[in-house]
Image: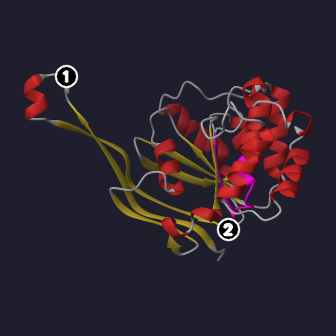
């Protein structure tokens, strides 16, 4: 049996919010609403595989990703990375979570240097040049990120996730909003990576091209898990959930 890279057991995440914090009575005697974002979630991801995570908006995918990356802590349940608690394994994880993890008023080089220093990457200058060459943005490396196109920002965020050469890569909709040509290039880069990858996407083509297995999430729960060969079956289930954003991009 393949080695387990990620083990998720009975995972649950609740969020509490005040019903009406601006009301004076509620201020002194607050009442709270509990929202369950991830519920009774079990999943194993094997070393070297790419697992696609599909689900409607609000299904809990981003919350699950933040739990795996150690950004959020679970209400209950367990996450292990290579058989150890996630808190001890953060350096083994590379995270691409939109454009919020890069700094627009810095150059691409300074962004990568900043994160390389955080992760204590040795010879970070060579690593930065290697990634800039790999993702084809060397000509823009010393420009401010605020002047980058969406495609170049995506390349930079992927390079940022890889700066410390992690064993596990978590990608949240890596080609969202990109044109067809740039999307194809990003997929080609991802496909060539020798990593354990968890990928969320709304694009059928992306999931079909990159993933070894497909998981379907709804209302915080894992509702289906199939091999790539049963992709159409998963998509049919996805459609029945009322998802309106599946694309063939």
**What percent of the width, then of the height, locates residue 197?**
68, 55
Residue at screen point 11% across, 29% down:
26
* 24 shown above or below 56: above
Q: CA distance from mark 1 to mark 2?
A: 49 Å
Q: Is residue 166 magenta?
A: yes
* Secondary element at tag 1: loop
The image quarter in which residue 24 lies = top left
Q: Is residue 189 magenta?
A: no
Residue at screen point 88% across, 57% down:
126
The image quarter in which residue 117 lies = bottom right
Whether tag 1 and tag 2 are in contact, CB under 8 A, the answer is no
* 94 shown above or below 167: above
Which numbered disc covers residue 22?
Answer: 1
- Is residue 88 toward the left or the right of residue 111 in the image? left
- The residue where tag 2 is placed is 47
For disc 2, the neighbor class at 10 Å (few under 14, some 14 to 19, many from 20) is some
Residue at screen point 8% across, 35% down:
29
Which numbered disc covers residue 49?
Answer: none
- Mark 1 or mark 2: whose residue is earlier in sequence: 1
Q: Of circles 1 and 2, which is in front?
A: 1
Residue 171 seen anywhere in this rendered image of the structure: yes
Q: Which residues are magenta?
A: 160-172
């Amino acid at each position: 049996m393949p080695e387990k890279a990620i083990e998720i057991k009975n995972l649950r995440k609740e969020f509490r919010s005040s019903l009406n914090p601006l009301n004076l009575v509620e201020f002194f005697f607050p009442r709270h609403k509990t929202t369950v974002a991830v519920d009774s979630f079990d999943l194993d991801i094997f070393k070297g595989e790419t697992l696609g995570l599909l689900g409607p908006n609000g299904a809990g995918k981003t919350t699950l990703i933040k739990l795996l990356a150690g950004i959020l802590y679970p209400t209950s349940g367990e996450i292990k990375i290579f058989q150890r608690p996630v808190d001890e394994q953060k350096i083994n994880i590379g995270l691409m979570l939109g454009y919020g993890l890069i700094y627009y008023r810095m150059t691409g080089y300074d962004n990568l240097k900043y994160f390389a220093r955080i992760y204590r990457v040795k010879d970070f200058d060579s690593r930065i040049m290697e990634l800039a060459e790999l993702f084809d943005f060397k000509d823009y490396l010393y420009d401010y990120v605020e002047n980058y196109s969406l495609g170049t920002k995506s390349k930079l965020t992927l390079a940022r996730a890889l700066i410390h050469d992690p064993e596990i890569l978590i990608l949240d909709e890596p080609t969202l909003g990109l044109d067809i040509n740039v999307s194809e290039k990003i997929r080609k880069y991802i496909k060539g990576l020798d990593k354990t990858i968890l990928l969320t996407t709304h694009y059928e083509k992306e999931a079909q091209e990159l993933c070894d297995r497909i998981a379907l999430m709804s209302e915080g729960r894992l509702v289906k898990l199939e091999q790539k060969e049963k992709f159409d079956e998963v998509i049919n289930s996805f459609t029945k959930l009322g998802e309106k954003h599946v694309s063939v991009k």
